[in-house]
Image (cartoon, coloured by chain):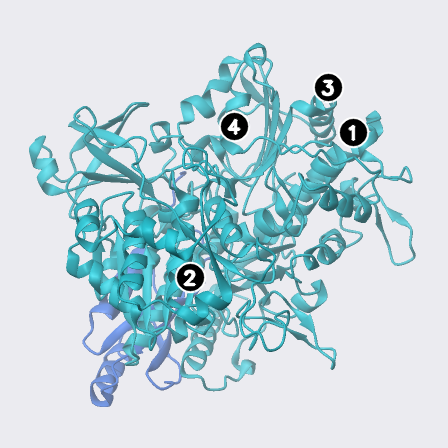
Chain colours: A blue, B cyan
Amino acid sequence: MPVNGLLVTLTSDRRRAEAVRALISSRSGVALGPLRDRWQPLAVDTPDVKSAHDFHEWLEALPGVEQVDVIYVGFDQPDPTDTAP
Amino acid sequence: MNLTERRSFLKTSALAAASAAAAARAETPFEASAVPDDIAWDKAPCRFCGTGCHVKVGVQDGKVVAIAGHPEAAVNKGLLCVKGYHVGGILYGKDRLTDPMLRRNGVLEKITWEEAIDIAARRIMKNPAGFGFYSSGQSTIPEGYAINKFMKGGLSNNHTEPNARLCMASAVTGYISTYGVDEPAGCYDDFDACNVLLMWGNNMAEMHPVLFSRILDRRERGDDVTIIDLGTRRTRTSEFSDHYLEFRPQTDLAIANCIARQLIERGAWDKEFVETHCAFRADADIEKPDLLGVAISFDDFKQRIAEYTPEYVSGLSGLSVEQLTLLGDLFANPDIRITSTWCMGMNQHTRGTAINRLVHGIHLLSGHFGKPGDAPTSLTGQPSACGTAREVGTLCHTLPGGRLVAKEEHRGECEKHWNLPAGRINPTPGHHTVLLFEKLCTPTDKGGDIDTIMVQVTNPGHTLPNLKKLYQAKTELEDKFLIVSDVYPTASTEIADLVLPAALWVEKSGVYGNSERRTQQWFKMVEPPGQAREDLWMTIAIARRLFELGHSGMKDKDGDFIFRFTDDAGNEVPAWDYAHFHDVNVDRALYEDYRPLTHLKHKHVAPYDVLSRETGMRWPVVEQPDGSWRETRWRFSEFDDPFVEKGKGIEFYHSTTDDGRAQIWFCPFERHPEEPDDEYPFWLCTGRVLEHWHSGTMTMRVPQLRGAMPNAYCEVHPEDAAAVGVGNGDEIIISTRRGEIALTAWLNGRGRPPRGTLFVPFFDEKRLINNITLDAYCPISKEPDYKKCAARLRKA
C-alpha cells in the first residue's frame, strides 16, 4: 500500500496544463498540492506497488506532462509480494 | 493511530514533501509548517552514488518509514532518483546479518562479539605484516581515518586499500599529475553555466540521474546547452543528447589528441592562458610510465600530436572526420563554456591515467578552465570515494590530507599529530588492491605474503576482476583467513572465515565527501538489528584487543591507547567497550582530529558542528571575519578560491613543478592488451544499471528495485545475435580467456551496443560477470579495466 509524493512538470502552455491538472485530480487516491509555476506536487495512495507503477506510467504518458519525479516514498507497510533475494 | 488515520497522515506528509520540491523548483518560498510533525525527520546524504543527494529521513517508532528529497539541498533540490527514494528500504531486507559468525568445518556458526574481536586480533598479532585492511569509498570519513591510524600509525603496515582503487584511482593520478593535487577544480554549478556538456564514456542519465536532470531541466527552460555523449554504446544518455559520437573502445586517447592537434593546427589554443599557467609534459619512457614524467617543450608537444589528424583518428576511432571536427570547433570557440564529465569509462582503463590527463589537457590548452561552466570534472561512483578514500587517504601509499607514506616529512607530520614515536610509519607503500588479493590467493611459500584480510563496507568477492584468480582461489589455502564485515550475506561472506554483522547508513553516524568536494554529515537515527554494530567500533575494538595482547603499536608515545577519547571532564571513555561506544560522539572526535590534517593541501574541510547544520559544504571551507564559514566552488580561480594569490587570476598552487603551473600532457594512443581477435571477436564491457547500485547488496533487498531489474543480462547487437542464431530472451554463453557465463540475450534493449560489442551489468551475484573480466590495470593508477576485454558469444 504505497503512498508516494510526486512532482509533475507540466507544459508551459497554460491551457493544456490546466486541462491535464483537472484530469489528474479526477483520479481516485490523488491529492494535489498548490501549483508552483509549472510544477504540480501531488500525493497518491495506491493499493499495491504495481498500481503505483501503473499510475506513474499513466502520468508520464499524459499530453501536457513533461516529466514526473518521485519526491517521497512511504514504505512502512510490508509488500505482500516481497520474496527473498 | 488507526490505519485510516495513518494513511491520511502519510499522504499529507508525501504532499508536503512534493510541495516543498515544487517550491524549490519554482524558486518560491515554502512554508515548512505545512509538514506534519508526527514523524521525526532528520537529514542524511543518500547511501548510494557519489552525486551526494541529500535526503530527509522520516523515523517513527524506531524505524525509517519515509524518505523525501531534501528541498534545501543544493545538489538535488528535493529530487531523488529511483534508488534514492527507496534508500530507506535497504535497512529492512529479511536476511540482515545479525550475529558474528565463525566458519567451523565449512559452516558459519554464531559466536559472541568478544570471541569475534579476539579471533581477529590474535590473527593480526600472529603476523602483523601479513595483514591487509580492505575498506571502501562507502566507508565514512571517521571510519577511514580510524583504519588509516590503526594500520599505518599502529601496525606500521601500509597494506590498506579502499575499493576506490577499482573506480577512482585513475582520476586521482590524472588530477595529481596535471595540477599537483587531487580532486576537481569545478563543481556541479558548472552544469548550470555550461553551454556544452561533453560526457566521456559517461552514462549520466542512469548513473547520476539527478545531475543529468539538472541539465535536462535547463534545456526544457530554453537555455543554450548542447549535450554530447561520447560513448562506446548507445544508452539512455544518448537518447537525450544532441550528438551521440560512438567510438571504438580505447580510442578515446586518440580522440583527445586529435582535439589538441586541431587547436594547435588552427592557432585556436589559448596562448595567453597556456603561456601564463601551463607547461608541457610526457612520459620519459612509455614502456615504464610514472606519475610525474618529464618536461617537454611546446614544439615537442606539437610534434608528438601531429600524427593525430582527423583523418587518421577517424580510421582508428570510427568517428567521422565531421564529428572530430565538431569537437575541435567547440574547444576552439572561446565564447562558449564547456564542461567535461567522466566516470568509470575513463577510469577503468588500462591507460586510465593517460586519458584523464588528456581531457584535462584539452581544457587547459583551449582555456576552457577556471570559469563557471568551463571545467573538466570527474564524477565518483561511491558516496565517499572522495571524502574517505582520497581525502583521508586510505590507499596503500597515502596518509591523511594528500600526504604520502614515501615522504619523510609527511610521515613525520602524521606521527607528530598522532603522538607516535618517530619512524612508526612504514615508508614503503603497501600492496594495491589487485596485488593485495593476489597475494592472499597465492600460497605463502610461493610469495603470498598476505595471510589475513579484513573487509569492511565493500564486496570484493563480487567486484574484483578475474574473481577465480583474485578471490575464490583463497578457498584452497588453509592458512589464509578472511574477515568480512557486511550487512547482508554476499559473495564475499560466502567464503569468509569470520563474518561480522555491520550497522548500515542511518543506523550509525557518519561523514561523507561527494564528487564536488562537498563534505556531508549525518547522525545515527535508528538502531541496527540484532547484534549488528558500527564498523568504526570494530576497528577500535580490534585495536584495543591488540593493545591488551601487548602490541606496542597500539600505544602512543605516552603509553596511551592510540584511540583515546575523553568526555567533557577529560576522563577517558572506553569506546572499545560497546556499552560505552556512544557515551561520546566518536565520529566528531575523529573528524575533528582529522580536520587540521586537511590544511596541507588546502583542502580545509568544514568543522563538524557546522556540517551538522548544513546539507554539505564544499572545501576549502574558510572562516570569515564574522565567524561564518565560506565554501569554495571553483578552486584555483582568484574570484572564488581564497588561496589564490591576489592578482594572479588563476594559480595552481600545488603545481608539480612548484611554479604555479598545470601540466598539459602528451600521452599516445596505445592499443588495449586484450583486443578482440579471431578466437574472441567481441569487446565485453561491464557496468551498472539505473535500478541497482554496485553489487546489489542493498538494492537487491528493495522489492521495487529488484522487481524492476531482477537479473543481469547481456546486451547484444541484433546482427551479432542473428549470426549465432540467437533471439531476444534466448540463453547465451559469453566466454573470455578466464571462463564463461550463461546469460539472457537482450536485443535493442535499454542499451544498444554496436556490432562487435557486448554489455553485461555486474550487480547480479547469481551471474558473476567478474568471474571472466580482465585484471589488467593502468600502470600508474593500478586501476583495472572492467570496460574492455575480448569475448565470444554462442547460443546456450
Q: Earlier in the sequence, mark 1 or mark 2?
A: 2
Percent from the top left, x then y, of residue B316? Answer: 20, 45
Q: Which quadrant, please, contains the N terminus of chain B?
A: bottom right
Asked which secondary structure carries label 2, the reply is strand
Which residue bears the numbered disc 1? B546
Percent from the top left, x then y, of residue B187? Answer: 48, 66
Q: Are marks 1 and 2 in contact (CB under 8 Å)?
A: no
Which residue bears the numbered disc 2? B376
Q: CA distance from mark 1 to mark 3?
A: 11 Å
Residue density around tag 1, few if under 14, some if 14–19, many if 20 or more, within 10 Å? many
Asked which secondary structure carries label 3, the reply is helix
Q: Is residue B723 visible?
A: yes
The residue marked by circle 3 belongs to what chain? B
**Disc number for residue B435:** 4
Which residue bears the numbered disc 3? B126
The residue marked by circle 4 belongs to what chain? B
Residue density around tag 4, few if under 14, some if 14–19, many if 20 or more, within 10 Å? some
The residue marked by circle 1 belongs to what chain? B
Residue density around tag 2, few if under 14, some if 14–19, many if 20 or more, within 10 Å? many
The type of residue carrying mark 4 is Leu
